[in-house]
Amino acid sequence: MPTTAISLTPTPKRVQYDAIIVGARCAGASTALLLARAGLKVLVIERRRYGSDTLSTHALMRPAVLQLSRWSLLAPLLEAGTPLIETTTFHYGDEEIAIPLDSGPDLPGLIAPRRTVLDRVLVDAARKSGAEFLHDMAVADLFADTSGRVRGVEIRGAGAASLRVSADIVIGADGIGSLVAKCCDAQVLRAGSVSAAHVYSYAPVESGAGYHWYFRDGIAGSLIPTNDGLACIVASVPTRLFDQHFRADHARARMEVLEALSPAVAVQAGRAAEDARLQAFRGVPGYIRQAYGPGWALVGDAGFFRDPITAHGISDALRDAEGLARAVLDGSEAAFAAWQRGRDVFANQILDATDAVASFDWTLADIGERHRRLSAVMKAEVQALAGEEMPSHTLPAARRRPAARRAPANDTSPPVAAGSITQRNRMRMRP
């Protein structure tokens, strides 16, 4: 007699965790990896399927490569076929400036892995360390106690009833439109003033190619070698220009920009497969949000976003994941405040440098100086990261049990009657 297989929606293995992370991309998976390695019980909830792609130009800068090397993940990425980048070339009009990359044991070069590779490597490493992942699941809401401290999340899967899961801290790694940021009313500490649009696709590239960055008055582009013998080829313009000229025909407008930047890179882009899909990001101004509050924190684009034109987003995500993990493991208000201060030192400098490029108000005579300012910030960032010890749990073993551990962010209130944050906010009862 034939039987019908029943697909059961996965559910959490526990009702209480040390940390719940919303989002399993590079920021969320990195935070989960570091907390799980330190012995915490971590649940990560991701609305997309495991190994799925996402918008990204892939290029990693020195800080990100250093972090991956320190976490013993650079080798797996190279073994997955990610090409090692050993030169980067800036094209300012017809001028070319090729820069060989200094190599060392922790920084042999740069890499630009596809997100189907990078995110999967991070998730797999976090799982191996004990973190629990639920893909194809959505967080519907957060809930808080009567003091307003976040106590956990409400999750839902396809066709499943909502389920509440508690945690000492809920971490939003859920991007620009972060639900965690909205539920917790995370304030914008600083807003950027410009935005740029980026349209990209993939085309075959020769082995050994480096990064190429192209600039002419009012437009920019890039060629970024990634996995599978392909390069991500990007056309970048001010958002206003995108709205005027790209809406009707992304492909034609992108090729016009690439042709204006460099006939050679346009020829390269023309070698793409006929079914190669174009990806477009219209752009939004950057921002720095409040990083934490009672029982919650933000990491990655949820907490700090800067335009992709400087290719620093993944570097920011990995740096801030390590800093947040250190604060969570300490658990004190002072540790969270120190983490936010440290984050903001670099975030403000990077936002300044990025907006200076994404504004497109430069000329070919001064754009190089703007890139040198960004390079100086990254050099200081690498030095700061190299001097940090890896996050570790320094509390006595008896205090590592969830029931006995001090809750993060200086929380001393008991977990009393909890309510939906969305409902509380609708009643103007902000936590």
Image: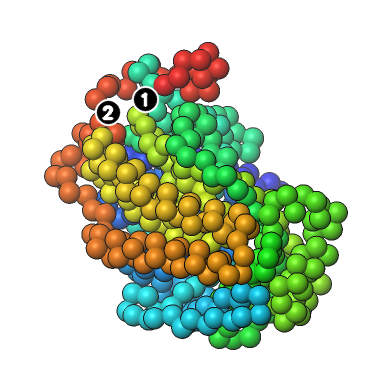
Where residue 396 appears, as percent x and y from the top left, is 14, 44
Where residue 177 appears, as percent x and y from the top left, is 57, 40
* Above or below for 31 versus 422: below
Extreme residue in the bottom direction: 207
| Residue that badge 1 annotates | 149
Tell me, for residue 411, which label it has, or none.
2
Nearer to us in this view, 122 or 12: 122
Amino acid type, residue under disc 1 in the picture: Arg
* Label total for image: 2
Q: Is residue 276 visible?
A: no
The disc, 1 or 2, on the residue closer to the chain's N-terminal end is 1
Dot 2 falls on a residue whose secondary structure is loop
Quarter of the C terminus within the rendering: top left
Amino acid type, residue under disc 2 in the picture: Asp
Badge 2: few (under 14), some or many (20 or more) residues near its Cα, within 10 Å? Answer: some
Instruction: Specify the quadrant of the image occupied by residue 148.
Output: top left
Q: Is residue 72 visible?
A: yes
- Contact flag, marks 1 and 2 (Cβ < 8 Å): yes
Q: For the point 30% across and 65% down, which residue is it? A: 383
Q: Left or right: where does residue 113 sit relative to residue 321? A: right
Nearer to us in this view, 40 or 186: 186
Extreme residue in the right direction: 248
Q: Left or right: where does residue 133 sit relative to residue 147? A: right
